[in-house]
Image (cartoon, rainbow, N blue to C red):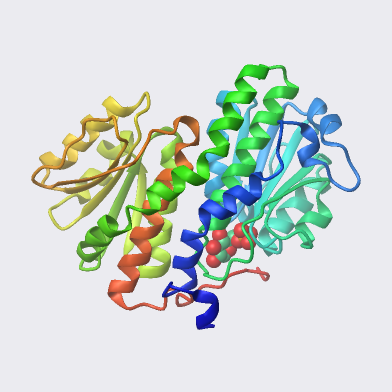
C-alpha cells in the first residue's frame, strides 16, 4: 500500500533505493572471509571447497546475469574454471558431468522451476557439491542444496529484479574470496583490503543513487525510442546485458546488449541517429579499447549515453552524453554501474506510462515450466 511505498511511486523505485541497506544487511556481521559463511545444515563448506576444482552456475533471468558476472571474478581471483548456463538449457541437453564441480544455483525466489530442475538434473548426473545464493531462506532451493548463502535483500515485490541482483553479486564476490582462500590464492592483506572495499559499498551506492536526476534526463529521450543498444566489456558485459533486460521488461523498448568488441560483427549495422547506445565505461584495463569502440558508433551518427568513471576523461560533446560515476570501484564496479541502468529503465518506463511493478506477460516467480 501507499504507506509501505513511502516517498516512492513504485516498489521498483523503492527497491532500487533500498540497495545500500540491502548490501549492508547482506554483509552485516562478516568479520572475515571464511568458508563457514556458506555452511548448510548438512554440510561444511570448507570440506566441499577442498574437493572441487570447477564451478557450474545455473540460473534464469537477472540471476543468470549475476552468475555471468561471477564467472569473471571466479576465474580472475580464484583461478577456478567456471561455466554459467541458463537453467532451462542445461536441464535438457547432454552435458559432460564432473563430480569435482561446485554446482551453484542463483535465485531470488528459490522456487524457479527451471533452476530447481537444473539442480536436480546436475545431482542426477552425480554432482553432489551444491550451493545456492538465494534470497529466501525457507525456499526449496535452500532446502535442496548442501550449502547456502542467504542474501538479505528483503522481500522484493517489483517483477523486475534490482536489489536481489546486487545482493547476489555481493554473495558471489564473497564466495569467490572464500574459494580463493581455500585454494591458497588470498593473502590476509588481500582479504582485509577486499572486505574494506565491500564495507564501503553502501556509501558508494548512495552516491550513485544521487545521479537519479541526470538519469531522468536520459530517460526522457529513451522514452521516444523503440530500440536501444547496450555495450560493455569484460566484467561489465553482463551489466550491459542486465541493463538491456531491465529496459525490455518494463518499458517494452527493444534492447540488446553486446560486448563492445563485437560491434563490427553485426550490431554496427543497426546504428543510426535514432538508435541510442548506452556504454558502461569503468576505468579498467579495457577502457582505451572501449573508447575506440565508441568512436565507431559516433562515426555512424549513433548517439551515445556513457556511464563513465570519474577518472576516465570521457567528456560530453555533440552526440555524446556522459554521466560521471562518483568513484572507481575496481572488481566490485558492476554493483555500482548497474544502478544507473536500473534507474534508466525505471524512469523510461514511467515516462511511457507502463505498469512498472507488473509488466505485461511477466511473473515475479516462474514456478511452472
Ligand atoms: C522471473 C523474474 C525475474 C527473475 C527470474 C529468475 O523472470 O521476472 O526478475 O530474474 O524470474 O527468478 P529467480 O527467483 O530464480 O531469481
Q: Nearer the viewer, residue 88 or 367?
A: 367
Quarter in which the N terminus is drawn: bottom right
In the drawing, does residue 191 fall left or right of residue 361?
A: right
Q: Give the image location of residue 194, x and y in percent.
A: 58, 28
Q: Is residue 231 visible?
A: yes
**Quick check: 133 above or below 18?**
above
Residue 196 picture quarter: top right
Examine the rendered structure and indicate whether residue 303 appears above or below residue 195: below
| Count of numbered circles on the image | 0
Whether residue 353 sits left or right of residue 77 in the image: it is: left
Which residue is rendered at x = 73% and y = 48% of the image? 132
Question: Percent position (x, y) of residue 34?
Answer: 76, 31
Point 12% across, 47% down: residue: 319
Asked whether 281 or 199 is in front, the reply is: 199
Q: Residue at x 53, y 80 (%)?
A: 3
Near-viewer residue (222 or 274): 222
Residue for point 34% across, 30% down: 283
The answer to whether 122 is drawn above or below residue 154 in the figure is: above
Which of the four quarters of the rendered structure image does ligand 1 lie in? bottom right
Residue 78 seen anywhere in this rendered image of the structure: no
Amino acid at each position: 500500500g501507499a504507506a509501505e511505498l513511502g516517498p516512492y511511486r513504485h516498489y521498483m523505485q523503492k527497491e532500487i533505493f533500498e540497495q545500500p541497506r540491502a548490501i549492508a544487511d547482506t554483509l552485516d556481521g562478516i568479520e572475515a572471509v571464511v568458508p563457514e559463511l556458506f555452511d548448510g545444515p548438512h554440510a561444511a563448506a570448507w570440506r566441499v571447497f577442498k574437493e572441487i576444482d570447477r564451478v557450474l552456475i545455473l540460473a534464469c533471468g537477472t540471476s543468470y546475469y549475476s552468475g555471468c558476472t561471477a564467472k569473471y571474478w571466479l576465474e580472475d581471483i580464484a583461478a577456478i574454471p567456471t561455466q554459467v548456463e541458463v537453467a532451462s538449457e542445461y536441464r535438457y541437453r547432454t552435458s559432460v558431468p564432473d563430480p569435482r564441480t561446485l554446482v551453484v544455483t542463483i535465485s531470488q525466489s528459490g522456487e524457479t522451476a527451471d533452476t530447481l530442475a537444473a539442480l536436480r538434473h546436475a545431482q542426477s548426473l552425480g554432482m553432489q557439491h551444491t550451493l545456492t545464493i538465494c534470497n529466501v531462506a525457507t525456499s526449496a532451493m535452500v532446502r535442496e542444496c548442501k550449502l547456502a548463502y542467504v542474501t538479505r535483500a528483503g522481500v522484493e515485490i517489483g517483477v523486475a529484479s534490482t536489489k536481489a541482483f546486487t545482493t547476489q553479486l555481493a554473495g558471489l564476490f564473497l564466495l569467490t574470496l572464500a574459494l580463493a582462500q581455500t585454494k591458497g590464492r588470498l593473502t590476509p592483506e588481500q582479504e582485509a583490503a577486499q572486505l574494506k572495499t565491500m564495507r564501503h559499498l553502501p556509501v558508494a551506492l548512495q552516491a550513485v543513487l544521487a545521479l537519479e536526476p541526470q538519469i531522468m534526463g536520459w530517460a526522457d529521450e529513451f522514452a521516444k525510442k523503440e530500440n536501444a543498444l547496450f555495450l560493455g566489456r569484460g566484467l561489465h558485459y553482463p551489466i550491459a546485458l542486465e541493463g538491456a533486460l531491465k529496459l525490455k521488461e518494463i518499458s517494452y523498448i527493444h534492447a540488446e546488449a553486446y560486448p563492445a568488441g563485437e560491434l563490427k560483427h553485426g550490431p554496427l549495422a543497426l546504428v543510426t541517429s535514432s538508435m541510442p547506445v548506452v556504454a558502461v565505461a569503468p576505468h579498467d584495463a579495457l577502457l582505451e579499447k572501449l573508447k575506440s569502440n565508441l568512436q565507431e558508433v559516433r562515426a555512424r551518427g549513433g548517439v551515445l549515453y556513457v556511464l563513465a568513471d570519474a577518472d576516465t576523461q570521457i567528456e560530453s560533446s555533440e552526440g555524446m552524453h556522459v554521466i560521471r560515476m562518483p568513484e572507481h570501484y575496481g572488481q566490485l564496479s558492476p554493483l555500482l554501474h548497474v544502478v544507473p541502468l536500473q534507474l534508466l529503465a525505471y524512469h523510461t518506463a514511467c515516462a511511457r506510462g507502463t505498469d512498472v511493478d507488473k509488466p505485461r506477460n511477466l511473473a515475479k516467480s516462474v514456478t511452472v515450466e
